[in-house]
Image (cartoon, coloured by chain):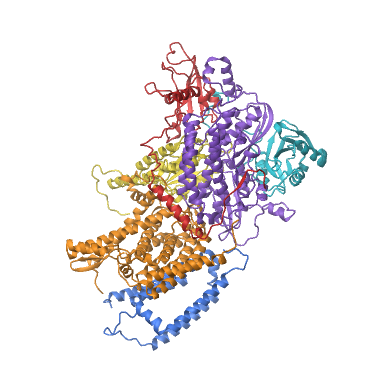
Chain colours: A yellow, B purple, C blue, D cyan, E red, F orange
Amino acid sequence: MSDIKMGEAPDGFEGAGFFATSLDQVVGLARSHSLWPLPFATSCCGIEFMATMGSHYDISRFGSERPSFSPRQADILMVMGTIAKKMGPIVKQVYQQMAEPKWVMAVGACASSGGIFDSYSVLQGIDRIIPVDVYVPGCPPRPEQILDALMELKKMARSETTRRRNEPEYKALLESYNIPVLEG
Amino acid sequence: MAEEVFEAKTTSDALAMNRPVVEDKGYTTLNLGPTHPATHGVFQNILTMDGDTIVHGEQTVGYIHRAFEKIAERRPFYQITTLTDRLNYCSSPINNFGWHMTVEKLLQVDVPKRAEYIRVIMMELARISDHVICNSILGVDTGAYSGFLYVFQEREKIYEIYEEVCGARLTTNMGRIGGMERDLSPTAIAKIKDLVYNSLPKVLAEFEKLFDRNRIFMDRTVNVGGITPERALDYGFTGPNLRAAGVDYDVRVMEPYSSYDDFDFNIPIGHNGDTYDRYLVRNMEMWESIKIIRQAIENLPEGPYYANENHYYLPPKKEVYRSMEALIYHFKIVMGEIDAPVGEVYHAVEGGNGEVGYYLISDGGRTPYRLHFRRPCFIYYQAYPEMCKGLTISDAVAIMSSLNVIAGELDA
Amino acid sequence: MFSLSSIQWAFYILAILTLFGGLGTIMSKNPIHSVLYLILTFFSLSAHYILMNAQFLAVVNIIVYAGAIMVLFLFVIMFLNMKEQEANELKKNSTIIAASIVGGTIGIILVAMFRQVQTQPTNPNFYDSQIGMIESLGKFLYKDYILPFELVSILFLVAMVGAVMLGSKAKGERDF
Amino acid sequence: MITNQTVVDDLVTQFGTSVTEFEQPYGMLTFTTIPEQIVEILAYLKNHKTLKFNFLTDITGVHFPDVEEKEFCVVYHLHSLENNVRVRIKVYLPEANLHIPTVIPVFVGANWMERETFDFYGIIFDGHPKMERILNMEDMDYHPMRKQYPLEDATRDDKIDALFGR
Amino acid sequence: MQLTDRSKKTDKRELNLIERTYLPGLATGLGITIKHFFSKKATIRYPEQKRYLGPVFRGHHILKRDDQGRERCTACGLCAVACPAEAISMVAGERQKGEEHMYREEKYAAQYEVNMLRCIFCGLCEEACPKEAIYLRHDKFVPVFTSRDQVIYGKDQLVEDMKDRYNRDAWTKEDMEQMWVKQRIANGV
Amino acid sequence: MESLSIVNVIIVLTIFFVSLGIAAYETYFERVVAAYIQDRVGPDYAGPYGLLQPLADAFKMFFKEDFMPAKADKLLFVMGPGLALFTALLTSAVIPFGDSLIIGGKEYLVQGIEVNIGILWVFGIVALGVYGILIGGWASNNKYSLYGAIRAASSNISYELAMGMAIIAIIMTSESLSVRAIVEQQHGINWNVFYQPMGFLIFLTCAFAECNRTPFDLPESENELVAGYHTEYSSMKLGSYLFAEYLNMFVTSAVISCLYFGGFNYPGMDWVHATLVGLAGETAGHNIATFVGLGAFFTKIFFFIFLFMWVRWTVPRFRYDQLMNLGWKGLIPLAVVNMVITAAAQLSGSPLIGGYIGLAIFLIVFVLLWPLTKPKSRML
């Protein structure tokens, strides 16, 4: 870049820098209120997701009612229902197509751990192929629990930095799943 | 695309084989699914398109194959109820009771009248919730979202009833072999009455008003994806989709189970099996279901709600403390050591999508030797490419949602 | 030289844009890009019209050419999905020779024209600012030139009917 | 009114010894036939003037590893909608020769059911236009519903089998 | 094909001229939606308002203690056998002298684990338990997890806290039926 | 050339920012209206009553990763959303938002620019609006996007024709192409909608189609084409597309109000003007009256925006061929009929009565001829 040396930063303005941190906070806050889900609904939990979208639970109160079926536009990958081994690569592909920042919610026992289906054809939890941020127990979980998970994700979104993907931990996490890390 | 080796003997055979189009005219291939919103996440249709017209479709299924039948061979009879919950998750009580009736047929247990009536009520509620989902999703897939949320509120009320009766919303695990797990509570009865007398008819009428005579909706659905009754039978259609084609086949009437012959209801049939017919048939069936529930809840007989068969039905908890016999039976039933007779049974119930069949072979062990589910979706979804041939993507989407293909049932 | 008025500045900038667009149209490899350059050309031409106080002409140019015809062009090209090979066929020697002959001829004609043409500076005293306006245009068309105007409209009607006839499919075929 | 006995009589006169083992478990007529005859029997039952078994309810397979020469069984369920009579037809196949003709020419709907049976048991339906796996992955190397294969996913690690001898 | 005498054709009239103008359908539709626009909203604002989940809702597991604070579980293992998801595992322990105030029966579960992500909340364990020890709470869900190592609940999370006891109207279905009878009598029906 | 005064600049900038602000808050309105129609409550976590929801969305989209599909046409992929936004913004320039303000003895029109071909300008820019979608959809190199783009292009072209013909009928009665002149002719409650109810319906339908709103939202129909032309777009590029859609809605509502509902005119405006002038003096009174007119105009705009949303959450969408049929076989002939009726009414000397008589004659003839034109019964 340039050979100009940075002056000493005043106390309290260290680290990522004052503006960067407050920007982080603002962006995190904005993100937390606008988490658009990608409903990857395969079975029963998908019906409960519909109930969450429905009038009684109304996910729109959290700004998340716009389902983005295009992975490019989504913020949360909500995997709802059993993921068979045949489906696994597709989940992974969808995850890779999503734009950063992205979070993954495994809704229900099947997506989280295979649940009752401990069989040759079912993936025993999607965390074997993609990193999962929130697991929701239940088979299917009640809409309340899905909302709880959404609020958990909101907390995460608020506390994460804007450039989450550049952090070494995150890169290591993705590499452990064999997902290529794009520089950006 | 794998080309076939089969030599068709006649032209009708060639039609029957559903031969793929081989000549290449510069068609585009469009991959609909498995994450396409209209496929509800789980099946793939590779459509060969001539511009906007579908020339041929090729389906891939099995994206949520969960090995139900294999699991069923490892589970005692009473645990299989939890599997049937997840077959057609839109109407799990029907599957639950269908399974229980199959086992009862095998064990030759007579279920008391009250239990049968409660089952009928629950099954019809399940049918309503199934049809509600299907029809409102048809609305969503044709672009009208609000109707979906209006009727979903009623579904939410059905959930409340389930909750009252069994403690879960969707995967109910309702009923036990030999009867019901628990009786209908006064609250549940009040809620059911409120539902079928007040709220549901109103909302349903409103839903019909919203769509039935709306020209946009009719244009989208009338004469879209029609099928002749002969072809439908050939493909193994059952349920509302077959009835829409004009065949009044209904297991509830043909082979009445669970006291269905006590009730007076009609079988709605359509004219030419198109999307609009399927929609109308489902709507009318909901009205018939309401009728059945009204009759059942008004004439709910008093008496026990489970068969007095201590070999299959868990004894009361208090008994288990007090009497040794009850304790032994309790352990035997939970461990799955009931002495099932050797034999094979096929039992069918009218599920949300048609004839749900259970083919059970028992070798006398604690688990079924073989349990095969006849899943209506799996069988009629084959006809999908034929139904949307020559139509557009929009039609394909509408047909798919009006066929009500439930992934859990499709892939087993 | 550097004391151009704002109008002149606008003219030169637009002229450059027009030429750039025109050249882009014929030089770009991708047909879609060609069409877009052509649209740019139309726009700068429309801007020229505005400079000449012919607002109506400018807007009609945009509506008709940029708004309708070019959209259809783009539409068709997108459907055709022209591949690189086919595009390269335009770059054969014979094409280049033909193009240069045509271009040269046009150049000669243009030079001949400009030698003949007499430019008169506008007399500000007699300048009628309404001359390019829609009102006077309308009066001209519907008073002085009513017959040619109506004839042209009949011509268009015939062309339209012909197009429909050509475009319609035989009976029994699906209508789209 | 058609009873099971009418069906039996009709079949025996038509097909003679190739239909055997008539039973009526829980009221449903069940009989066994040989693979070569299955298409003709189904076609005969479907096109019969009075019987009219025009609805193929189901096709499935069963594995009996302990029965010699009859390790596999394909079970057809037919339904005569007009007479409201069901019939179950069984075809036993030896493990060495798992071939049976397809019934798609008679019932189109058999297509996927046969594919499923192939997928689960490896029974090959001769003449089927697309004898491929349907539910499982293409690269699966065994037929999972056979009794010798385990149900469980080998990778599951959160269950302590030792505790209850499962 | 006519199979029964109960069939009823659907109403599939052709659209009449006025309906073909799109306007009547549009008008009724708009009327319905505007009615809903001004109607009462069905939403339950979840984190602030909580919904009653029914008397027998199957939520968070709990290992009950009896009134003296002793654990009821006797480690018979029926719940683990009954579990279709194979989510329960336990290790039995012999009650030692001096532990009578802790365990009601002679055997007890030294270790009791439920894998909350495997569990399908079917309620079969509750039904299978001969000692009325395990219950699925009707007033509480299992919380969401952020990592896979939190999901196996041990006894510390499952056994009832005596300070904050779990209560429900009726512990068994028989009790519940008696309760309904009492209610009915109280209501004078 | 008259030099631009500072007031003009301020007016232009205000119009610009107000359009942007309204477009941003339309997303919020859309969510709330949808929620209310569906018995829900809508966003209420982002700020009081969820009012900060659009800001949260915008911030999120700004800081989201920008995706460029590998095989996309890079330049056009970026150009698409920009173009969509640009064309959407251009239209608001010629809309007369209010009467005029008197500042320092000079009269300033509350309008971006007053040109005598205003309506053609609107029409031309609307015609260009499709480029953003077309280019973006093509550049994404995705079949769904391409389908969306093609649907958008064809529907826009088709509905422009009927729209243009409806506008011609308006021009006939107003005898001017200037939007301001058209508005000023509808003084008081002398609104065009009473003269040309059919023209209004045609224009409204076409406006829905031009904005790609349900029932004409085929380009992005979620359940058919995933997200249509913007399937491959993420971050602010997607934001621009969504923003352009809402901006278009705002502008279209404004145009409808101007053409058919008298713009800033409202019943009793003369009385209000006179009273205000009497109360507050010539200049101030006039200015206040202008603001009242502005309020009336925005009320109309908001009503139409609401109508857009109301219809969106009510009806199913068309199929592609039905859309074309409606446009070419339904609306264009109707628009021609409307033009003829308007012309005849204009010549008859009494536009209002003549118009209605013409309409009645047309309806009678149509109903009488209907059995003859009826196609073969498609339904059983």
Q: Quadrant of the C terminus of chain C?
A: bottom right
Q: Nearer the viewer, residue D131 or F124?
A: F124
- In this rendering, the answer to whether F180 lies above or below F148 is below
Q: Nearer the viewer, residue F34 or A156?
A: F34
**Image point (49%, 77%), residue name:** C156
Can residue B341 be seen? Answer: yes
Residue A133 in the image, given as x and y percentages of width and height: 43, 39
Q: Number of labelled discs?
A: 0
The picture quadrant where one finds residue F282 is bottom left
- In this rendering, the answer to whether B224 lies above or below C75 is above
Residue D31 in the image, given as x and y percentages of width and height: 75, 36
Q: Nearer the viewer, residue F295 or D63?
A: F295
Residue D81 in the image, given as x and y percentages of width and height: 69, 43
Q: Quadrant of the N terminus of chain C?
A: bottom left
- In this rendering, the answer to whether E180 lies above or below D22 is above
Can residue C15 be seen? Answer: no
Residue C143 in the image, given as x and y percentages of width and height: 39, 83
Left or right: A79 with respect to F47?
A: right
The picture quadrant where one finds residue C46 is bottom left
Left or right: F363 with respect to A120?
A: left
- In this rendering, the answer to whether F300 lies above or below A14 is below
Q: Nearer the viewer, residue B156 or E84?
A: B156
Left or right: D154 with respect to F123?
A: right
